[in-house]
Amino acid sequence: MDAFINAKRRSVRIRYITEITKNNLGYCKELISIVDELRHLDGVKGNFYVTEHEYVAPSTFHENGKFPEWMIYSNVREIIEHQQYVFDCFWNKSSSAERKMTEIRNDVSLGLTEIIDNPSRAQELFIDLIKSAKSEVLLMLPTVNLFVREYRIGIIQLLEELSSHPKGRAINIRILAPINTTIKEMKTKTTLSNLKIRHLESVPNLKVTTATILVVDRKASLAIEKVNDSNEKFIEAVGLSSYSTSQPTVISYLSIFENFWNQLELYQKLKQHDKLQEEFINIAAHELRTPAHSILGYTELAKTDPHYIEKETQSFIEVMYRNASRIHKLTNDILDVTRIESDTLWLNKIKFDLKEVILNAIEDANKIMLLQPESNKVKLEFRNMMNAEGEVVSHSDDIFVVGDRNRITQVISNLLDNALKFTLEGVVSVDVARNKKQEVQDHQEEGIVTVKDTGPGIHPEILPRLFTKFSSKSFSGTGLGLYISKNIVEAHGGKIWAQNNNDQGKCGATFSFSLPLN
């Protein structure tokens, strides 16, 4: 230590490398105040000193304050330059002394970053990192050849094994890779279908990094550059690799992965939206074309044969009115969706009797059914709601709510239209009752309207997205009615829900919505 102090007085710049441990922490604290730079290197053995002109190395370890038994000394220029190179290599691999001291004091690991230029070691580390995974593996493979090479060295199969919950561990595995015929065949022939793989090339103009990126448990990362992607062997195709347990580095690679993953997810949602929009346009065009043709046809008859129209006037007018009403409803639905999407759905709230609105809606539905001979096998009725024990929930004749009467009528009509459209024979029943909201302390009451049919029930594919736009399995209709109804009910502070019937083996579905009575 005295030698360093004397050298410092002579303005000599001192760089020092050692392994900092709990045992020598006090000595290192003292040393860091004397030398210009102190750095830490795991596992460093022995010691030597090298200046511009001399090289000295004790041949054995020696106690503090005592001279070693043997020394190696040289002032040969070639040996000095060689030892300076050795020191610089150690220096470049070492890390900050302050960082290591902080780790020891706080009993934490701040991580490290290492550049690996040995492809065989990179391959071993790649496999070992995946085997060590406890909760999550994120892997980006920018090319098809990368995917195939990783498959050949067992990486993909290892990931598949981890996804099967070995030893009860549920490991989340996500892979970003281009998907071509070769990879699709691999997925078909093996159990790779269990892995979550997103197609990197599915987004046009998406600029992807050319390096393989692996992030394990959000604690370690490995980035491997490729130098010859056409080579079939892993160790001949890759170049330098960067391994890190430093959180800033790991988070950087994690952000790169998540950014690509989220872009692909967003793109798929947009594609799905575009597909739904295209389906809606086709449905809307069909819905508009059919009544328009009917109106045009009967109008043409009226123009070309006045004598014939005199005898059939009433039936012609009924057909034209019915089809014009279909066009009118479709137009209104499209306008309502536009208002909902732009948050401009306006409510004209008044106090009205919910039961009266239901009766009027049933009466209107019955008039329409009279014009449709195929509806003769369906009975539409109004009755009091019963609970699970078969008891009437409410005997009240009047159930008043404050809301937009026309909009609530629209909701009830939509539910009735749906039920009648899917019920070829049987009963469509409408119930209304008071019910106390269990979760509300002041026992606030709500009115519950239920429409129950004996149709085929709700298709399992539609059920999860029943109240979204364009959800329909029907050959007619746009799939907008339930979406509009949901938004109207929620704008009144209520809820809407649906379920398939399972009472006494009967089929059909039940749609319900609630409105606060206060």
Image (cartoon, rainbow, N blue to C red):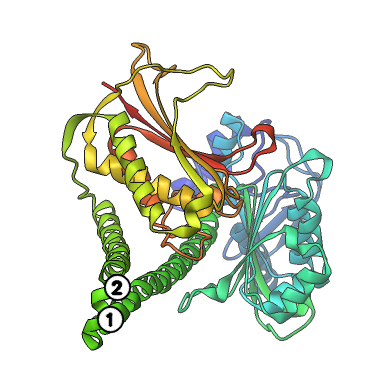
Q: Quadrant of the N terminus?
A: top right
Question: Which residue reaches farthest top?
Answer: 442
Residue located at (56% from left, 49% from top) = 425
Provide the residue designation for mark 2.
312
Q: Which mark is residue 308?
A: 1
Can residue 257 be seen here? The reply is: yes
Asked if the residue under mark 1 is in contact with the one under mark 2, i.e. CB atoms within 8 Å, the reply is yes
Provide residue 8's location: percent of width, then percent of height.
47, 47
Provide residue 516's location: percent of width, then percent of height.
31, 26
Q: Quadrant of the C terminus?
A: top left
Q: Decide: is 381 above or below 468.
A: above
Residue located at (21% from left, 38% from top) = 404
Q: Give the image quarter of residue 115.
A: bottom right
Q: Amino acid at mark 2?
A: Glu
> Which of 200/145 is in front?
200
Residue located at (33% from left, 39% from top) = 489
Q: Secondary structure at mark 2?
A: helix
Residue located at (28% from left, 81% from top) = 308
Can residue 71 be seen here? The reply is: no
Q: Which mark is residue 410?
A: none
> Which of 340/141 is in front?
340
Q: Decide: is 262 above or below 96.
A: below
Q: Decide: is 362 above or below 156.
A: above
270 left or right of 96? left
What is the spatial separation of the Cα atoms under label 2 and label 1, in whole angstroms? 6 Å
Q: How many marks?
A: 2
